[in-house]
Amino acid sequence: MIVYLMPKPYPTIIPGLRSPYDQVGGIVYFGRMLDKIRLNAEGKLPEEWASMLGTAHTGGFDGRCCSFLHISYEEIVSETLKGGTDEELLTWAFENGRKPTAEEIEIWNAFMSKRGWKDAASGRLKERLKEIGLEPDTVDTMFDFLDLDEGQR
């Protein structure tokens, strides 16, 4: 029996979800994580995404961001849903976790924005591209993939 897998719908447009490159307080990805939390609470995330929020944070970008700031995912979810601006939530994270130095933020931003380029995530990037019917060398990084998949580039 031959099974043909159809590519996932492309692009995945989610109004209100910003690019992972967008920064809050000079830190990439943090704002996107907040967007996903807020959109999920409003029922505006695709079901597949919402079902992964509770588990994906352990090894995904949300988890890395929380680890970088020394806060738990559950804590940032709780705090985000209380309200407040992105900047207020980042200040909360600094006060309840840690405030990285400018050099640590620079290293974080470089690491995250290059994830998938000649590293342990390269295989996953190729898988994700295949899932939406694109060639494995269409983009070089997971951030670029996210922007491409979500119609932001």
Image (cartoon, rainbow, N blue to C red):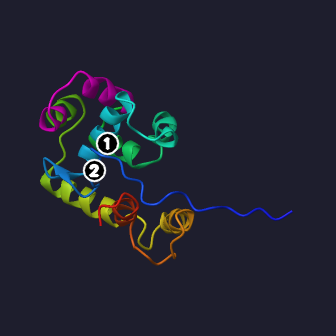
Classify residue 14 as left or right of residue 95: right
Q: Determine which residue is flagged by label 2.
A: 29
Magenta: main secondary structure: helix
Classify residue 63 as left or right of residue 134: left
Tell me where residue 45 sits by quadrant: top left
For the N terminus, the image quarter is bottom right
Mark 1 to mark 2 CA distance (whole Å): 6 Å
Q: Residue at image x 30%, y 30%?
A: 76
Q: Please, what is the three-letter code of the amino acid marked with disc 1?
A: Met
Q: Determine which residue is flagged by label 1.
A: 33
Q: Does the residue at mark 1 contact the one at mark 2 (Cβ under 8 Å)?
A: yes
Q: Which residues are magenta?
A: 73-89
Classify residue 85 as left or right of residue 12: left
What is the x, y in percent for residue 150? 37, 57
In this rendering, the answer to whether 43 lies above or below 134 is: above
Label 1: how many Cα within 10 Å (few below 14, some 14–19, many 20+): many
